[in-house]
Amino acid sequence: MLEDFEIQEDDYLVGIDIESLYTSIPHEVGMEAVEYFLKQDMSTSNGRNQLYNIGYTFEIGDEDYKENRYRNVSNNICDIEVYHIEQRDNNIVIYVACNVDNKHYRHLLTFKFAIDEINRDPDILPNITLGYHVYDSCGSVNKATKDVLQILSGHKMSAPNYSCMEHGIVAGFIGDLQSVTTLQMARLLNIYRYALVSYGARDTLLSDRRLYPNFFRTVLDNQIQYEAIVKLLKVFKWNWVGIVTSDDDYGQRELQELSKHLANHRICIEFKVLVSYKNYKTIPPEFQVAGYLKRVSFTDLNDKEIFFNEKGELPSSLYIVNWVSYVQHQRNFIHIHEVGEYNGTAPDDQKLNISLQLISWKNNKVPQGRCSELCPPGTRRTIKEGYHSCCYDCVTCSDGEISAIWDTQNCQKCRDDEWTNEAKTKCVPRLQEFLSYQDNVAIFFIVGSLIFSVVSVIITGLFVMFRDTPIVTANNRNLSFVILLCLGLSMSSIFLFLGCPVDITCLLRQFFFGISFTIVLSSVLAKTIMVCIAFKATKPGSLWRKYLGVKLPIIVVLVCSSVQAVTGITWLSVSPPFVEYDMHSFPGKTIVQCNEGSVLAFYIMLGYMGLLAAVSFVLAFMVRTLPDIFNEAKYITFSMLVFCSVWIAAIPAYLSSKGKQMVIVEIFAILASSIGILGCIFFPKCYNILLRPEINDKRHLLH
C-alpha cells in the first residue's frame, strides 16, 4: 500500500471519510490531535506549512465514478497531492500529502475558540450551550448546498423541508469564505429565514437587503475594494492595467463593476483574463437571530465599536499587503507583509494610508503601468487619433493658460490681469507697459524739452533786454512774448504724457497741449494778419490803417483760442479721457494708456490747429516777398510748413501705433512742431540782435 512513496519521520497518517470530511475517530478527539500537532510543529518550524499524509477513503460504484471523484478531490484546509491509489474490497484508498493552509485552518480554530469561550462564560448566554457542525464546501456550490440541507435535515440524511435532528436547534449559519458558495447558501437559507453570517464573501449582490434580508458579513462588499484599487493605482500613477478574475458569475460581476470604476477615473484596461476553477459538479426557523444581529452593537476589547450597518456589513478596513517571492535552498517561498490600510469610513483624503518605503519591488524598480509618460506641468494631454484613450501625447499649454499639476487633461486660463510664466506652470501678474521716465526715448524727450524750454526763456529774456529795438518791436512784440511763453508751456506738456497714466493726467494732457499750442498758432496767425495789413496800409488813404494797433491782434488771439477752449471744455464735460488697461494687444502685457473718451473731439482739436496753421501759411506765403527788412512773413511760412509737415507725418504713424508707441509719436510731434516754430521765427531775430547789431538801429532803418 505504501510501496510507491516514502514516509518521512515527521509525517502523520490521518484517515478522513470523504463523504462528510469527518474523521473516523471521534470528532473532538481528532480536532484536538490535529490542533496539538499543528501547534507543536508550527512552533518548531517558524510558522511554515507542514506536510501531512492523509488517507482518504470512500465507497465506489463503478470505474467512471471512481475516476471522476478522484479528479475533483479538493480541500480548503490543505492542498492535496496524490501519492498512491489502490482498491481494497469495495473501497478505494487514496494516499495523499496534505500541505496545511494555516490561514484556513486558523479560521476553524478561531471559530472553535469563540464557541468554547461563549459556552465557558455563564454571563454571555446563560442556560444555553452552543454547538456546531463543521463542513467544508471545497469551493463548490453544489457541495455547499448539500451541506446546508444536511445540517437543516440532520446528519443521517438530507430531507429538504424536514428536520430529523434528535436534539438542539439550528440557530444560524456561519460561512462561507467565497462569494460564489455564499450566494447559494444565502438564497437557500433565505427561504427558511435563517441568519447567515459570512466572514469573507464580498459580492455586491449580497448587499441587496430585499433579496437577502437575513444575510450579514464581517467584511465590506467589493465596492470598497474597487475604491481602494483605484486610489492605489493613483498613488503609483498607473492608468494601464489588466484584470484577472474567475470565469463565473461572480467574476463577471467583479469585472463589470471594477471596469466601471476604472473608466470613471480614466484608467484603461489593456486585457481581461477569466480563469476557470474546477469544482464538484453535484448538488421551523429561528427568526429571532436575524433580528438580534441587526441590533448588535458593542465595543470590543480594543475599544472598537462592533455593529452591522444598513447593508448588513461589519465596517472594517482593508489591509494592503506586499507579496515577495524568493528562493531559498532550492525551494520557492512567499513572504507577505502589511504595507498599508484602506479605511472606507474615513474622510476621502485619509482613507488610504500606505507606507511606500515598506514595499519591495522586483529589481527595486516600480513598474510603469502606463501607455504614455506623465505629462509634466505646463503641458496637457492630447489623445492620439486611433489609439486608446490612455495613449496620448503631451502638448504645451496655449498662451495665457497653465497647468500646475502632472498629467492634466486641460490647461487653466489665467485671470485677465495675469499671464503665464515661461514654463506655463503658474500665472504671474502681467507686465505693465507705458512710457516710463526711465525709458531711453523718454529721457531723450525730457532733455530736449528742458533744453528748448530754457532756450525759449533765454530768448524771452533777450527780447526784454532789446524790447525797444526795431527787430523786437516789429510785428507786435507782445505777440512774440505770448508765443514764446506758450511754446515753453507746450514743450513742458510732454511731462503729462510720461509715466504711468492716471485719471488726472489723462484728463489734462490733451487739453493742456491743445490750448497752449492753439494760442501759439493764433498768435502766429495774428502776426501774419498784421503783416498783411501793415503793407496794405502804406498806401495813401487806405482803409486798413484803422486796423493797425494792438486791438486787432488781441481779438484774433482771443477769438481763435476761445473756439479751442470751448471745444476742449465740452470734450471734458461730455466724454472725458480716462485710464484704460489694454490686455489684448500684446501677449503677457497690460498696456496702461489713456482712452481719449471721444475720438471725434480729439481729432477736432487737431484739425482746428491744422486749420489755423494752414491759414497762417497761406497768408504768410502771399506776403513773403514784400520789401521790408523786418518782414516776418517768410519765417512764418517756413514755421507753418514745418508744423504741417510734422503733423501730417505724425497722424498716420499715430493711428498705426499701439501702447507707448502712440505716446512717443505724439510727444515727438509736439516737440518737433514747437522747436520748428521757435527756430524758424525767433532764431533769425536772435542772430540779428546778437551778431548784427548794426541793423537793429533806428538810424539804419531810416537810412
Image (cartoon, rainbow, N blue to C red):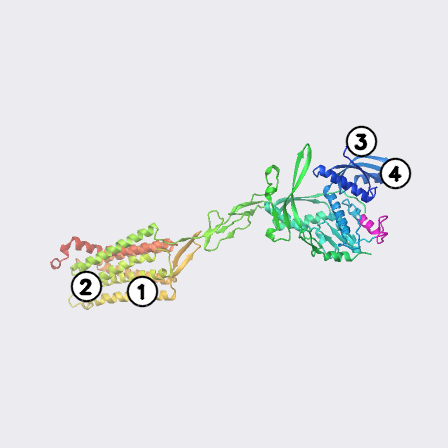
Residue bearing mark 4: 90
Residue bearing mark 3: 4
Between disc 3 and disc 1, whose residue precedes?
A: 3
Q: Nearer the viewer, mark 4 or mark 2?
A: 4
Magenta residues span 145-167
Q: Separation of disc 4 and disc 2 at Cα?
A: 155 Å
Q: Are marks 4 and 2 in contact (CB under 8 Å)?
A: no
Q: Quadrant of the N terminus?
A: top right
The amino acid type of the residue labelled 1 equals: Gln
Residue bearing mark 2: 534
From the top left corner, tell me how far across and down residue 596 is, in percent: 38, 60
Mark 4 Cα within 10 Å, few/some/many (few <14, many 20+)? Answer: few
Q: Nearer the viewer, mark 3 or mark 1?
A: 3
- Which of the 4 image quarters holds residue 31? top right
Whether residue 21 is visible here, answered yes or no, is: no
From the top left corner, tell me how far across and down residue 189 is, in percent: 78, 53
Residue 148 among magenta residues = yes
Q: Which mark is residue 341?
A: none
Q: Nearer the viewer, mark 1 or mark 4?
A: 4
Depicted 576 relative to depicted 433: above or below: below
Q: Nearer the viewer, mark 2 or mark 1?
A: 1
Q: Are marks 3 and 2 in contact (CB under 8 Å)?
A: no
Q: Residue at x 41, y 53 (%)?
A: 432
The amino acid type of the residue labelled 3 equals: Asp
Q: Separation of disc 2 and disc 1 at Cα?
A: 28 Å
Residue 694 among magenta residues = no
Q: How many marks?
A: 4
Element at badge 3? loop
The overriding secondary structure of the stretch rendered in magenta is loop
Q: Which mark is residue 564?
A: 1
